[in-house]
Image (cartoon, rainbow, N blue to C red):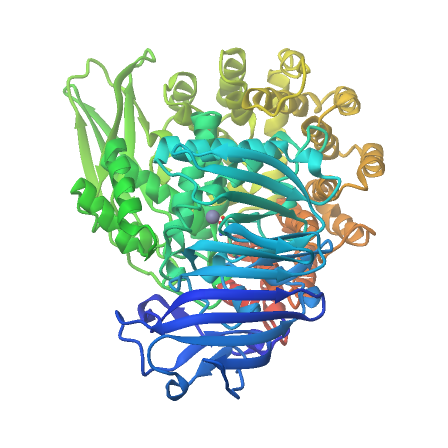
Amino acid sequence: MTDAAATAAPIPVYLRDYEPFPFVVRGVELTFRLAPKATRVISRLTLAPDRVVQGGGVDLRLDGEGLRLISLRINGNALALTPDPTGLTIPATLIPPGEFVLETEVEIAPEENLSCEGLYMSGGMYCTQCEAQGFRHITFYPDRPDVMAPFRVRIESDMPVLLSNGNPGAQGLGWAEWNDPWPKPAYLFALVAGDLQAHRSAFTTASGRAVDLAVWVRPGDEGRCAYAMDSLIRSMRWDEEVYGREYDLDVFNIVAVDDFNMGAMENKGLNIFNSKLVLASPETATDDDYGRIEAVIAHEYFHNWTGNRITCRDWFQLCLKEGLTVFRDHQFTGDMRSHAVKRIEDVMALRARQFREDQGPLAHPVRPESFIEINNFYTSTVYEKGAEVIGMLKLLVGDAGYAKALDLYFTRHDGDAATIEDWLQVFQDATGRDLTQFKLWYSQAGTPRVTVAEDWADGVFTLTLSQENPPTPGQPDKAPKVIPVAVGLLNPNGDEVRPTQVLELTTARQSFRFEGLAARPVASVLRGFSAPVVLERAVAAEERAFLLAHDTDAFNRWEAGRMLAREVLEGRAEAGLWVQGMVRLMQGDHDPAFKALALRLPSDDEMAATLAGRGLVPDPDVIRTRRRALHLALAEALRADLPGLAAPLRGQFAPSAAQAGLRALRLAALGLLGRFDLGAVQAAHLSADNMTEEIGTLAILLENGAGAEEVAAFEAKWQGDRLVMDKWFALQAGLAAPDQTAAVVESLTAHPLFDWKNPNRFRAVLGALSGNHAGFHHASGAGYRLLADWLLRLDPMNPQTAARMSTAFETWGRYDTGRRALARAQLERIAATAGLSRDLGEMVGRMMG
Ligand code: B3K
Ligand code: ZN
């Protein structure tokens, strides 16, 4: 961003200041004359005062940044007004009464736009990204989600493929028209023009509408679209079957672009995707890539109803569409794959990102109350905790209540720009449940800590649950929340004596009695991770081992192993019980994907968070050493079983959940085997016929300080493939030994293929640096310095990605004084830099507290 707006003093926006827009936009007609250095955007808006909010007699404010205004007319009469750095105000005195037409013509330069926001170029094609406030970089417009209008678009360009939202209209040589009948906010606008190839299919909706489907990619990539298309078709069917939601246009287009700030974008009828979330073949994509493609294709498709047909009144309501859509995509993946495995993976991700956010200086409520740069609030809290909140709501009102509420939500709010109040009202009306206390989940930041105490007397088992809601920035005191705690009871012989029951903890401390038991039971608490809380429970290691062996709830069975492993890594429990539990689990008859998850040790960052949560100062080197030692102890105990567990799969590759689970288990076993037999890993690497095993085995070699030759061979083989080379870069930065991390990263950034302006490549190297816990937090401060250097370099060009990647520093307060001083010095250096973006400036300011 080079315009003045980006460098002006940042002004926070507050939820409490919301005011409706005083005009309605009845129609939008846009003409684009595309040219890399001088694109003309001609806009014709039909406007009228909004009678509901008594508009009229007020100024008309349009947003616009970095636009060269060529002409401005109202009802055909030219106006000579000069825009300010953030937009254009048309004084009330110049606005005729009733409906009027406002025409503007502006010039922009997509080729010079390297921010991946607004209209920009990627790999020779034109594309757009408007959410949250990119449309104002394209033309003057009331760029806010509560202004919804039908759009007609005409694109003029010599590019062969010209796409926009809605249904195709007339077209000819060098031009095409598109017509989107569904009123939408400007953030859902999209345009693509390029030399693209289509992978096509078709879908007929439940009510008989024929929909043409296409995945558009650069020539040469057509062969890698089948899985994305298959995922789309399954998503469309699922949303009809599970939520009764049908698609509503004649076409659905997906376009893959190489330069993209995030995963994908749900523009109406024209989803734009980061190419890494579309393109897949067994040779180039891992099982995790396939899983993510399926989930993100579904997520963007599901937004058609939760986000597009019903959108957000203002950006504070972001979780209304994101929390719900994440919740829906989690349900979808569970249905497609395994609910137990999906839940474990989601909780691991929640703890790694959202708990980390909630327990640091960037903590904010699921519905924030102020922001400086809205793009900084596309966070794990809004998305993942937003989804957890919906999961709790569903538990509290039951499946039938949830289904009833969702039906009411879709009928009552179709076409609306809605709020969290609207959403909760729907649940109150559909189920009769008072949600006043529940609403605190939207307004209070921070992860509650729930403590469990138990008592056994006179045949009565009592569980006493207490909750504590720690202070977060700007929120020193908090009221108790309603926390659904799913509990089951097991007999000492392992049978379940009480099936899962949801206890509602609504006060600071509450007791729940279980009567009629013959013997003291073993409690399985917080089954399925029924609430996003930290559970504090002083349990003997033997009891954890018992639950690891017997719990009928798959999540809690995994959790028992996880907690035991954490305690061993903290030095609070002996390794033996955990190791033996794992050996038994591996010999048992369980889903291979589940076994693979059980074998995964808590990450270094998770251990640092655990220690910090107990008021201790984590030492990254000690954490790393202990983790390696426990891994070795497990390898030794499992020695006899490893060759069997690591055996190659038979038959043809399929990206199915079943095969993915088997491959994950094989790789986990190879990782253990590699502790004494790197030859077996090298052989597996050489014979790999799929990327999951090729990169997975390379990772094991690097973790063990080997793999130099294989790294070189991999580069020679894959240097022409951007997505695969991202993996190559990430692996080396992420797995470098602590003392060498900074040097390795520096040499990677000097590599001719290190195109730092490409967000995927930047993330591959610098994101992997921050994920290398002991390397990034090296006592020399070299990791901190290196990341700060690159953030400062990226910021003037792509502030969104720079700001997002700065969150590597959010945990700086956890560590020892030396590291804290070094990290803080880098934050201060960034903050003191002249011309810092609003995005990075806000993040660094919040992190410094
Ligand atoms: N809604 C977009 C995210 C837009 C991010 C803007 N900085 C993708 C998604 O959540 O589906
Ligand atoms: Zn989304």
Q: Which residue is drawn at 46% across and 70% down?
A: 45
Q: Nearer the viewer, residue 268 or 157?
A: 157
Decide if residue 614 is in sight here: no
In percent of width and height, residue 505 lies at 23, 40
Q: Which of 243 and 104 is in front in this view?
A: 104
In percent of width and height, residue 670 lies at 68, 22
Q: Nearer the viewer, residue 571 or 445?
A: 445
Q: In which quarter of the image is residue 545?
A: top left
In percent of width and height, residue 289 lies at 61, 35
Decide if residue 485 is in sight here: yes
Question: In screen coordinates, is 693 left or right of 153?
Answer: right
In percent of width and height, residue 798 lies at 63, 63
For residue 609, above or below residue 76: above
Q: Which residue is drawn at 49% across and 11% down?
A: 589
**Quadrant of the drawing holding the N terminus:** bottom right
Q: Quadrant of residue 284?
A: top right
Q: Which of 285 and 166 is in front in this view?
A: 166
How many numbered badges does the structure rendering display?
A: 0
